[in-house]
Amino acid sequence: MAVRSSSEDLFDSILMADNRFHIEGYREGFEEGTRQGMIEGRNHGMLHGAKLSAEVCFYHGFALAWKCLLQNSEDVKARKRLKAVESLVGLIQKFPYEDPEYENLQEDMEKVRAKFRQVCSLLNVAADFREYLSGSSGMSF
Amino acid sequence: MSWVKAVPSSDDVFDEDMDDISLQNKEWKCNMEKRVKDGYIDGVDSGKEVSLQVGFNLGYKEGAVKLKSIGQLKGIVSALRCWCQSQPSRSSVLSPITELLQRIDQHEQDLVEAMRKAQERPPPSVSEVAGDLEDMGVEQSDDRGGSGCCRKDGDSDCCRKDGEGDRCGQDKDMSRSLLISSRSSFQTGESLEQLLQSCMELVTEMGLSEELTFHIQQLRHA
Amino acid sequence: MKDTVELVQRLSAHPDSRCWYVAWNPKGSLLASCGGDRAVRIWGKEGDSWECKSVLSDGHQRTVRKVAWSPCGNYLASASFDATTCIWKKKNDDFECLTVLEGHENEVKCVAWAPSGNMLATCSRDKSVWIWEVDEEDEYECVSVVNSHTQDVKHVVWHPTQELLASASYDNKVCIYKEEDDDWECRATLEGHTSTVWSLSFDPEGHRLASCSDDRTVKIWKECTPGDGEGDGSTDTWKCACTLSGFHSRTVYDVAWDRLTGALATACGDDGIRVFKEDPAADPEQPVFNLTAHVPKAHSQDVNCVAWHPQEVGVMATCSDNGEIAIWKYESEV
């Protein structure tokens, strides 16, 4: 019996050592993983945020400028255009696009895009307009 | 756990064959090192799982802020350009506007390029073990595989008709990123301030409303 | 199946090409067809025979996918893969291109005129639905762009009496839109089909909507009125009242509800056309549709479209991938 119990003790201590080493490694790894994850996630997120922000802000600047250009015109057509432009500004102003955790991010983005396209149509802006948006390469003027 | 079998049993502890013991010790050490490494790999995985999203959210906000002013400026100048195109009397300012727009676009591309460069650089390792892990060929990227957006493209009956829609739209971004990353310079040559100044001068020259100038001025502080 | 469908005439409408769509003018005196040959053709009756009256070939650079007559019958809209929609004005016996609607990024898949004639809807592979307003000077203005689908939008159709629009998509869904504070919004999403929804048709009263799909079924959707206690007011609720499955062996490309008789016709990828009638004895909440007529090889290739004549009971036109149009006479025993 004594022999068995000592071999059991030994087995336990092996298991404990096994566990201890594993935990030690795990702790160190966890720290390193957290650090790497932060860096990778941040770099990844930065590009995403930049892309979306560039697009939304482009629409915002575009709409603000047109608002200034149109607001002194009196004719019916200009007023219709102004209304659509103002509606685009309104949509963007209440859109928390800088918050990655905003639950309707994608949905609202689609609404902004749709409004922008309507505005472009009303303004008779060329259809290939989107080509020089948000960091796209191969610009042609 | 095959290595457990190699651990000396109580009978063998006082064996006179030292070579055997040192061999077994080596093996024990090796096995325990392997346990440390296994733990390390598990730890890295769990650590990443916890921090990737946090890092993403943090970076997202930073990226969004960085592109805010330049994005708006680009929108403003694009609008001015469209407006001038539609007004024959304004055709003389068309070329300086186009030139400014190109400079703005370059600046924006440089900003994005710098971020992409940062993404392409793998995070530096602080511990030696990480180096060992790389030697062992452990994947450290967070590639989560394809998006699975093409679930129906194999459906011949469906795709034959009518030039079915592209389900692979998301992939466009990927190819675009490749294109851009082939460009070499990512030093931002011109400052935002210079671009804003040029834009203000143009707006003044065109005699446009002060409200617009105000919007442009505000971009300095955005 | 006790009813009969007899062939009246077969026309080689768009030779060496696909004929995608046919549409009767409101009086039923003219039939417009369009196809892969980039042309729109107008057919009229000479004696007992249907003849080609005009060819509108200079409007589009690519396939013309759909055509639609305005409710007054004086205008024709054509939607093309060249990303544009042409509005044609009828002048005596000829048509002139009045305006070209641009804005979609790529292939326009469908165009439909609202019953009032003051509005037009278009949809495209670019996943968007556009609503256009027409003023007295024949000027067209985009009043809304809606991005509710996640894929190619195949079809748009207006409600027969209300300002309500429905769209069908490659994303397997149907969306219902209404105007809300100057903008059009998706008010309901109808989910149930397991593959592309190709076409839609409202019943004569507009209480129900039929949809047909690549999943080889036709579904009948019914609007739940607010009194039913369903929905929270911010969205409308449509539910599937019945599914016609087991009748079609391939994709159902088109479905048409006859304004005159209430019969439902389908155009199928198995080259056949079918007519269904509702069982009058069935519970209106659980309608039953019986197949009453079937022409197995109506065309030698896919049947792309079926359209009931707006005035003459039982007359319908179909068209096919083989470039043909066929005119049929459906006779019901009851």
Image (cartoon, rainbow, N blue to C red):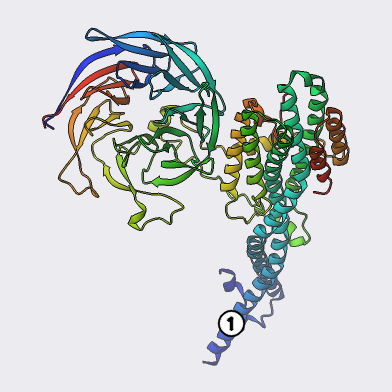
Q: Classify mark 1: residues with Cα within 10 Å, few (<14), some (14-19) or many (20+).
A: few
Report in which chain the residue with disc 1 lies.
A
User: Horizontal placement of C127 versus C72: left or right?
Assistant: right
Quadrant the N terminus of chain B occupies: bottom right
Q: Is residue C142 above or below residue B136?
A: above
- Residue found 73% across the figure and 45% down from its top: B120
Where does residue B20 sit, x and y in percent of width and height?
67, 73
Q: Is residue C113 above or below residue C53?
A: below
Say which of A66 and A33 sits in front. A66
Dot 1: what SS? helix
Query: Residue beneath label 1, please?
Result: A12
- Residue found 75% across the figure and 45% down from its top: B68
Q: Quadrant of residue A59?
A: top right
Where does residue C315 sit, x and y in percent of width and height?
23, 22
Residue B202 in view (yes/no):
yes
- Residue found 53% across the figure and 44% down from its top: C181
- Residue found 72% across the figure and 48% down from its top: B64
Residue B135 in view (yes/no):
no
Q: Quadrant of residue B154?
A: top left
User: Horizontal placement of B15 versus C57: left or right?
Assistant: right
Say which of B13 and C50 sits in front. C50
As drawn, the residue found furthest toward the front would be A74
Q: How many numbered discs?
A: 1
